[in-house]
Amino acid sequence: MSELFLHIGHAKCATSFLQRQVFPKLNLDYLGRHGRHLDVDKWVNNLTFKEKINIPRIAAAITVAKQSNCLKLPTLISHEVLLRPYKVDRLVSRLAELQSCVGKINIIISIRRQIDLIFSRYIHDRKLLTYNIAEALDFNGTTECLYPYCYKNMNTCYCRQHKIKFINIPFYNYLILYRKLTQHFDVSFVVF
């Protein structure tokens, strides 16, 4: 079976450019946004946000897609929603469980200077709501948006209660993220 690479973000770190212009042109089987789809949005949202999920079902879908790769090229799945501040520890645990079903997963993370990344996140989110960046910074990492489900939970999601899309500062600490992920995976960073 082919080797599996999982590009998990960061959002706002050239992910759309990579997904549209780079990954489809590489000598690999690209599944994911703008690639040969495997209903990636659905299983990524389930893996990231749902309380109860069926990891063997997700693993089976990935395995079928990998097996249909007749050239046995390495497989790449790219989706920046996998790396969101929403319950990162749970996500790492789920990815480790997924790895036990599909074989070794190599993690790729695209990064840039944290100050640029945080400001870009603020500019992106500010299109929806009006507030200043000082109000949005969450230094404790306790105010997590339930995206993409926050629209259904307008009374419970922090962003809806406070009319602010909070920026979870500990989430942008690459060292913490690296330590959590390298407990289970080989991790490569791509710097922009």
Image: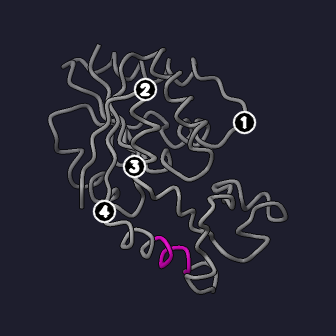
User: Which label's residue is closer to the chain start, 3 or 2?
Assistant: 3
Picture disc at residue 175? 3
- Residue 87, given in percent of the width and then of the height, sits at 62, 45
- The residue singled out by tag 4 in the image is 112
Q: Secondary structure at mark 1?
A: loop
Q: Secondary structure at mark 3?
A: helix
Disc 3 to disc 1, how far (Cα)?
A: 27 Å
Which residue is at a point 76% across and 61% down the rendered structure image? Answer: 157
Disc 3 to disc 2, how far (Cα)?
A: 15 Å
**10 Å neighbourhood of mark 3: few (<14), some, or many (≥20)?**
few
- Residue extent of the magenta highlight: 121-126
User: Which label's residue is closer to the chain start, 3 or 4?
Assistant: 4
Helix, strand or loop: magenta stretch: helix
- The residue singled out by tag 2 in the image is 184
- The colour scheme used here is one colour
Based on the picture, tell me whether residue 49 belongs to the magenta stretch.
no
- The residue singled out by tag 1 in the image is 51
Circles 3 and 4, Cβ within 8 Å, touching? The answer is no
**From the viewer's perspective, is residue 92 above or below residue 139?**
above
**From the viewer's perspective, is residue 185 above or below residue 149?**
above
**10 Å neighbourhood of mark 4: few (<14), some, or many (≥20)?**
some
- Residue 190, given in percent of the width and then of the height, sits at 24, 50
Compare residues 155 and 143 and report the one nearer the observer: 143
Q: As shown in the figure, which amino acid type bears the numbered disc 1? A: Glu
